[in-house]
Every structure is written in structure tokens, then in C-alpha cells.
Image: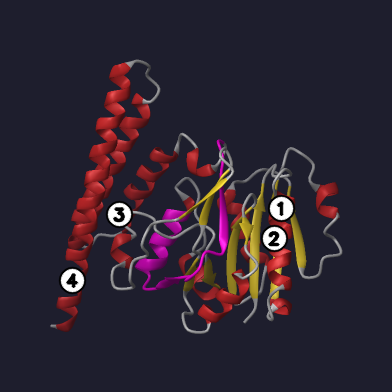
Amino acid sequence: MKLSVVVAAFNAEQTLRTTLNSLIAARDASPNQKLIHFIVVDDGSTIDLREFLSSYNLVPRLTIVRLQNNTGLWYARNIGASTCDSDYITFVDADDELRKGFFNELYQLLRCHPDAIATRYSDWLEETKSQRPDPRRFPSTHFQEYLILAQCFMPSFSTISRKAFDDIGGYRPSVTEDWDFWIRFFRAGYRSVRMETDQYLYRIHPSSLSRRPDMPFRDLTTVQIAIRENQDVKLRPILALSLLERLILVKAQKFSRRSGVGGKYSILFLGAGAHAIRQINRVMTFVTAFSFSRNKKN
């Protein structure tokens, strides 16, 4: 099974070397190294990365694609995927790191679970120079197509089969790229398992995409699109609660721009409300999944 690793980079000269070196080290440690190909997409960086990337010209099975303009993460990933001819695609962020056992465990799982593999990871907190394992449980295959409508439990740096990627049409613009992508993946009938061991370091810093101020608004747009594209009556409670949670988080984001005690307590109150709705929606997910499974048996 051939595997391509796509790294989309924009002005990432301070972290990209560490990322690429970790990819190379993990590949060198794998008995499947000749089946693994790296694709770096320079997404129109304003800082010239050509001289930096030229030091990797002699690295085998590494392709560099340069885009003239900054097109966005969704487009750069799609370009990287279109460049490869592999059976599977892994997306890696340009400021993260793989552990040496990453490809070994990945190939073991791909033999039994052909749709997708979620990467188990630890947060690398740049401000405190510390690691924090992801504490969340990964849902079983029975609940994935419903729970994905409430929250995105798939890391962006996961592995997907080429067949599934082409089937759902890759990434789309103007939304939370990852969440929208995985909603379409699971609603198309595909399923995923997660790695058993932590094989990835996800870097968190002030400029991380996960911390950008427009995330609540992008999440809200993603839910609105999911409502239009999933018309089944039984899904409405999950989608309605998901929409309410995002509306509250958008309101909290607006309050965060205000100063004073009133704004602070408003954010705490709204945050607690959003958390409560998410927990209720998890229960609703299980009820919906049970209802669908019972109807299938009948």
C-alpha cells in the first residue's frame, strides 16, 4: 500500500525543518519506507522558502509543489492530494512532529481498517514547553456518523483512503475545512479507528489555526451547511443543538472584545451554557444512533 504525506506550508520556515526532519526519521524507521512519499505544498509564502526547501532536493521520494498565490489550507491540501497516486493520504501540519513509530503503527491498522485512521496525539504547548495527551475518547463506529454532526472528533492530521477522499470531493472553502470534510466522510458511510499509541505532537501557539478568532463563525457556517445537506428528520435534534451551541460561542466571541467585569462574567456564563448543550447533544447522538439501528433491524 502506497502512502503519501501532504504538508501544506505558508510562511512556516521556523517550524517546517523540524516537521520534515521528523517525517524523514519516522519513514527511515519503517520497513515500508519505500512505499512512503512526501509532498510539500508551498502555499504562496510571502517569505521565499525556495532556498530553505532546496536543502531537501536530494531527499528521496519528496516532491515540492509551489503555488504562486496564497490560496488557503483547503486548496493546498487538495493540490497535494491531486499530485500523488498513492492508496492513502496523510495530512500533516507544517508546525507539528511525528514520532518514530508513526508509520509502523499506521501500516498495521491500515491492513484491517481501510477507510481512515485517526491519529492519537499529544498537544505540544509552546508557551510552557510541555506535552498534554489528548484526553478525549474516540467514538465507536456505531455512533460516528451522528456524533460528527455535533463535534469534530477527527484530527486534521489523520489518514484517509484515496477512494474515500475522491468520493467526498476533497476539502471545500469558506468553512471549517476539517469538520466539513469529516462530516461528509462519515455521512457517506465510511468509518474510522484511532491509533492505540500517541504518535504525533500537535503544536499549540498563539498563531495556531485552532486559536484564530473567526473559528466560532466558521464552525457556525459549517453547521448551517450540514443542516442543508442532511435533511433526515431524525438528525434534526442533533443539528439543532449543534447550531445552538455555535450561536452561543459566536455570542461569547463578541463579548470577548468587551472589557470590564460584565463582559468577563458573560463569557463564563455563555461558555458554561455551550458546554451543557454539548453534553446534552452527546446523549441525543446515542439516542439517535439507537433509533436508526433499531429501524434497520426491523
Residue 150: assigned label: 3
Q: Secondary structure at mark 3?
A: loop
Give above or below for 215 relative to 152. Answer: above
Q: Earlier in the sequence, mark 1 or mark 3?
A: 1
Q: Position of residue 87 (x, y in %)?
A: 60, 77
The residue wearing badge 2 is 22
The amino acid marked with disc number 3 is Ala
Which quadrant does the C terminus fall into? bottom left
Residue 18: assigned label: 1
Horizontal side of 289 relative to 106 (left or right) equals left
Q: Earlier in the sequence, mark 3 or mark 2?
A: 2
Q: For the residues marked 4 and 1, what is the alpha-carbon distance in whole angstroms?
A: 45 Å
Q: Residues within 10 Å of mark 1 (few under 14, many from 20)?
A: some
Q: Position of residue 84 (x, y in %)?
A: 67, 69
The residue wearing badge 4 is 290
Q: For the residues marked 3 and 2, what is the alpha-carbon distance in whole angstroms?
A: 33 Å
Magenta stretch in the rendered image? 178-206
